[in-house]
Amino acid sequence: MNYEKLHVQTLAGMSVDALKNHYAEVKTQYMQRDGRDTRTQAYLSQVDTWIQKSESVQEGGNQ
């Protein structure tokens, strides 16, 4: 999968569970590689940020 082609709109449309599953999948693949690339590190950081934003929105809606 070419993660660079996934953009903010795609992440914003994903549920929290889907984001978490996607993050885990990408991180697993990343950790299994010999080299560490900064693009994937940045992408994982962006997905993590979206997870946190989505969770805070959900918590705000459940009050």
Image: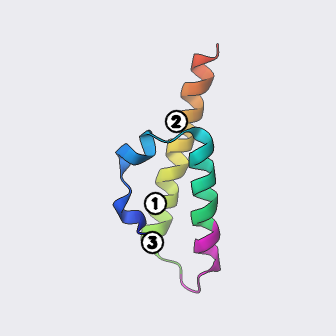
User: Could you say where residue 60 lies in the image, as x and y percent from the top left?
Assistant: 58, 19
Residue drawn at (50%, 66%) of the image: 41
Check whether the beta carbons of the residues at disc 3 and disc 1 lie within 8 A of each other: no
Residue stretch in magenta: 28-35
Q: Name the outermost residue toward the top.
A: 63
Q: Is residue 50 above or below residue 34?
A: above
Residue located beneath label 1 in the image: 43
The amino acid type, in three-letter code, at marker 2 is: Lys
At horizontal 55% and vertical 39% (from top left) the residue drawn is: 15
| Residue 25 on the magenta span | no
Residues under labels 2 and 1: Cα distance? 15 Å
Kind of residue at badge 1: Tyr
Residue assigned mark 3: 38
Residue identifier under label 2: 53
Q: Main secondary structure of the magenta part?
A: helix
Mark 3, other Cα within 10 Å: few <14 / some 14–19 / many ≥20: few
Q: Amino acid at mark 3?
A: Thr
Left or right: where does residue 55 sit relative to residue 39?
Answer: right
Label 1: which secondary element = helix
